[in-house]
Amino acid sequence: MGKAVRVIAQIGVLALFQLLGLRLAAVTHLPIPGNVLGLLLLYLALQAGLVQLKHIQEGADFLLRNLVFFFIPVAVDLMNWGGVFRQYGFRLALVIGVGSVLTFLVTGHASQWLQRRRQPCSS
Amino acid sequence: MQLLTTAFCMVLTLGAYHLAKTLNLKYRHPLLNVVLLGATFVIAALLALGLPYQAYAPARSLMTALLGPATVGLAVPLFRNRELVRRHAPAILAGIGLGTLTSVLSAGWLAALVGLPHDIVLSLLPRSVTIPFAVEIVKLHGGSQALASAFVVATGTLGSVLGATLLTWTGVRDPVARGLALGTAAHGQGTAMAFAEGPDQGTMAGLALTLAGITTTLLAPLLIRLLVPA
């Protein structure tokens, strides 16, 4: 089997798990997106040995390497939203700026504190 | 004619992606963000050709169809690094849990403080997670996919410009902690900066990006009810 065929077939397996996730979300009425449930289902299937890395990793790596490409069409929607940035630009910058600083500080210090507590002798 | 326009829009987007990626790789500047730059090229071309947004919409849905399988594919790096996750479980759980809470709560409270409209607040809440998670969160709970993506890119750009310096200034030196902070606060763009620091920081940031995305998605129903009462 050629590399391209393998990548496409493996993306098909990932799409199948997405579909399973979407069905699960619909049946259970969980307020969780179907593709996140698909991610969790695939992880469990890997853990249980039902799916092996070699069945999906070339497809997954291909998509994740080119992930940024798929964001561009979503961002093109911004052509409908220019007014929001003219009207609220300063307030948005404030919220994003202050919020980001807080997130960096909390995540960085909380995890460093726990890392140091656990390995007091090393480094 | 519609088919031709759709094909043209896809070729246009691919071209814009390659141009943006080339510029980004050549100058390596965080402000030359591939998403923002690529979308700007596409929008400029559509405006120059007099094509309305509706002409682009079919190509958009075709191209974004692969976002779902790509999100599912994030299970692969997570599974590959499961030993690493287990080894650093306390730091990962606390860092990502508290970081995610801080990100969503600070966005909600600050937005209420400065008086932003309802749909903008909803689009701001998932600003620290990577676009596929953010898009799914606004699809489920309200808000605009485009605004949410723009806020994600703004957060990632700011985080990749300032994040590492901020961590150094405040004394965060542990590579695991730096990676976790960059991935949790600034998703893929922060992860790129973490890989520039070293492989340990980079791998940790990549794991944080996925785990913060999952955590935010799971907490969203609760936090949104708390922050934005309908």
Image (spheres, rainbow, N blue to C red):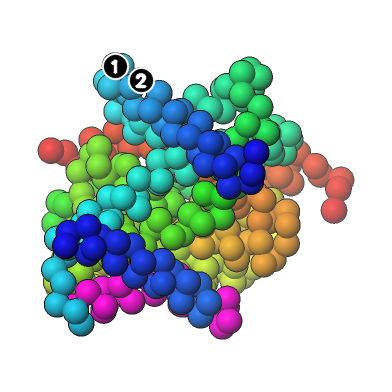
Q: Amino acid at mark 1?
A: Val
Q: Is residue A27 magenta?
A: no
**Is residue B168 visible in the rendered structure shown here?**
yes
- Is B104 above or below relative to B59? above
Q: Are marks 2 and 1 in contact (CB under 8 Å)?
A: yes
The residue shown at (53%, 27%) is: A42
**Is residue A39 visible in the rendered structure shown here?**
no
Count of marks placed on residues: 2
Residue that mark 1 sits on: A27
Chain of the residue displaying label 1: A
Q: Give the x, y percent position of residue A119.
A: 80, 42
By secondary structure, the bulk of the magenta-drawn segment is best described as helix
Q: Is residue B34 magenta?
A: yes
Q: Give the x, y percent position of residue A113.
A: 66, 47
The residue shown at (61%, 18%) is: A50
On the same chain: label 2 and label 1? Answer: yes
Q: Is residue A28 left or right of residue B156?
A: left
Q: Give the x, y percent position of residue B223.
A: 31, 38
Asked which quadrant contains residue B75, the reply is top right
Q: Is residue A122 left or right of residue A95?
A: right
The 10 Å Cα crowd at callout 2, few under 14, some 14 to 19, many 20 or more, is: some
Q: Check disc 1 and report its element: helix, strand or loop.
A: helix
Q: Check disc 2 and report its element: helix, strand or loop.
A: helix
Magenta stretch in the rendered image: B25-47
The residue shown at (40%, 34%) is: A35
Residue that mark 2 sits on: A24
Q: In which quadrant is the C terminus of chain B drawn? A: top left
- Is B138 above or below relative to B3? above
Chain of the residue displaying label 2: A
Q: In which quadrant is the N terminus of chain B drawn? A: bottom left
Q: Camera-side residue: B161 or A74?
A: A74
